[in-house]
Amino acid sequence: MKKIVFALLRYSGLPVLFREVFQRNKVSILVFHDMDRQTAEASFAYLSKHYNFISLDRLITALQNKDERHLPKKAMVVTFDDGHARNYELLPVIKRYKVPATIFICSGIIDTGRHYWFREKLDKKTIRSLKKIPNKDRIAFLRSRGFDPEKEYPNKQALSAAQIEEMSTYVSMQSHTVSHPILSRCEDEESNWEISESKRSLEKKLKQPINAIAYPNGSYTKREVAFAQAAGYACGLTVEAGFNSTRTDPFRLKRLDPNDTPDINELIVKASGMQVLLGKLP
């Protein structure tokens, strides 16, 4: 049924209307996570024909100068959250379609055998519940189930230093905190440390400026905005659905989430931002 809905929406002509009217003079930012290579091939083949890819750095410059004259029509920024190891497999696709992507990585997980807590074998309801409780309670629950955030596992889930170095010519690496907590559920000191330490650590490891942070799970408050500003970031990215312009708050940038879908119809509909005006889609 879901596939039928997205096929009907695609061929209704609404995605074209949204692209040519609502996205024409805005910047759309897409967020992916752990998409496979085949999905990336189909997605970027379509997007490259209908949008104009720009780097996040180019958007930041336009935001800082309050000048959108040098931004193309139907501008699109492509981002990936977390830094999953499989992102490396997408490099040939990224190069082929000239996608100036940004990957937001967790400084305490990349180049280690540590695992992402949200990839533990827990049902979706439990994962959702863990995102709503205090950070210390989340960690305690996970430890009670045998998950140790400091443990080095043989099957690595995150990008290695060598992979990051190879990708860095084509992909910008930016901050996604140290350990991917739900920042709004952290104590003040925890939240501030996750935001500032990730920047410091990544700049030391990668020997490059880290000027952007994506709030894990899109969870943030004005406290996190203040911490990010104090740490020296130039912008912060949310998962609030919407389009961006030079009038958008740099620390509350909106993104559209196609949810790594292998269904090209769903990708086309969600990349058009139809959900911004029509509400939640299937």
Image (tube, grey):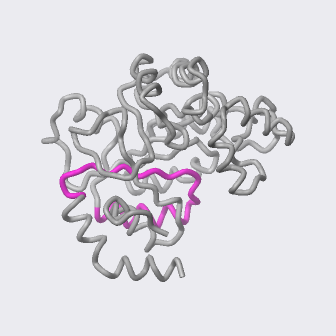
Quarter of the image with the N terminus in it:
bottom right
Q: Position of residue 174 (x, y in %)?
A: 48, 33
* Count of residue discs: 0
Lateral position of residue 219 relative to residue 114, left or right: left
Q: Position of residue 216 (x, y in %)?
A: 54, 39
Lateral position of residue 265 relative to residue 39, left or right: left
The residue that appears at 44% across and 63% down in the rendered structure is 280
In the image, residue 11 lies in the stretch drawn in magenta = no
Q: Is residue 58 above or below residue 39?
A: above
The foreground one among 188 and 106 is 188
Q: Position of residue 176 (x, y in %)?
A: 53, 34
Q: Quadrant of residue 225?
A: top left
Q: Is residue 229 above or below residue 264?
A: above
Lateral position of residue 143 relative to residue 20, left or right: right
In the image, residue 32 lies in the stretch drawn in magenta = yes
The residue that appears at 36% across and 32% down in the rendered structure is 251
The residue that appears at 39% across and 68% down in the rendered structure is 268
- In the image, the segment drawn in magenta is 23-50
Q: Quadrant of residue 36?
A: bottom right
Q: Residue furthest left?
A: 69
The foreground one among 73 and 235 is 235
Q: Position of residue 111 (x, y in %)?
A: 67, 32
The residue that appears at 46% across and 21% down in the rendered structure is 227
